[in-house]
Image (cartoon, rainbow, N blue to C red):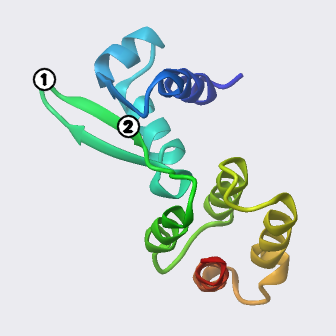
């Protein structure tokens, strides 16, 4: 298993017990025998708003990283997700968002499959540089109509 996955699972295990966890970047880096930038990478890619997390960070000697699960199990999550998408979204981020919505029980399996099919690269017949923009517009439109 990759180190990034191990770090992600460790943090998620900590979040099982509470909605919020406060971490020390250097302590985590020492624990996993890696550089602090590896911790930053995991947090920025695996604990983003579209995945249902809020991250607050303070650097310095007494610095910390506070990760909070923000994914409620109702329509407010959809509104939060629409606001978090922005003008563009990658295939990986949109897939993670839809999978999280399914896992949280916000959408059912059939809805998840339909949405994933609609935002798949093969369904967006534009230049690769435009796919993220079109995907964001499609995804926002679908989510707004779910509310």
Task: Residue at 28% x, 43% y: name it.
Answer: 56
Task: Residue at 54% x, 28% y: name it.
Answer: 12
Label located before the other in sequence (2 or 1): 1
Residue 140 percent coordinates (x, y):
58, 80
Structural crowding at the residue carrying mark 1, measured as other residues with C-alpha within 10 Å and reported as few (<14), some (14–19) or many (≥20): few
Task: List the single residue furthest toward the left.
Answer: 61
Residue 35 percent coordinates (x, y):
39, 23
Give the image quarter of residue 108.
bottom right
Element assignment for label 1: loop
Q: Is residue 82 above or below residue 64?
A: below
Q: Is residue 123 above or below residue 102?
A: below
Q: Is residue 108 above or below residue 115?
A: above
Distance Cα–Cα, label 2 vs label 1: 16 Å
Q: Which residue is mark 2?
A: 67
Task: List the single residue furthest toward the front.
Answer: 74
Element assignment for label 2: strand
Q: Which residue is mark 1?
A: 62
């Amino acid at each position: 298993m990759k180190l990034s996955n191990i770090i992600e699972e460790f943090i998620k295990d900590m979040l099982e017990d509470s909605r919020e966890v406060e971490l020390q970047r250097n302590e985590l880096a020492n624990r996993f025998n890696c550089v602090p930038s590896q911790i930053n990478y995991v947090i920025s890619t695996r604990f983003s708003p579209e995945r249902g997390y809020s991250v607050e960070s303070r650097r310095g000697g007494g610095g910390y990283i506070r990760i909070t699960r923000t994914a409620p199990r109702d329509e407010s999550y959809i509104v939060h997700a629409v606001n978090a998408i922005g003008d563009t979204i990658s295939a990986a981020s949109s897939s993670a968002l839809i999978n999280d919505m399914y896992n949280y029980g916000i959408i059912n399996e059939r809805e998840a499959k339909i949405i994933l099919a609609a935002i798949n690269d093969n369904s967006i017949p534009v230049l690769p540089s435009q796919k993220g923009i079109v995907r964001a517009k499609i995804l926002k439109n679908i989510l707004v109509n779910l509310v």
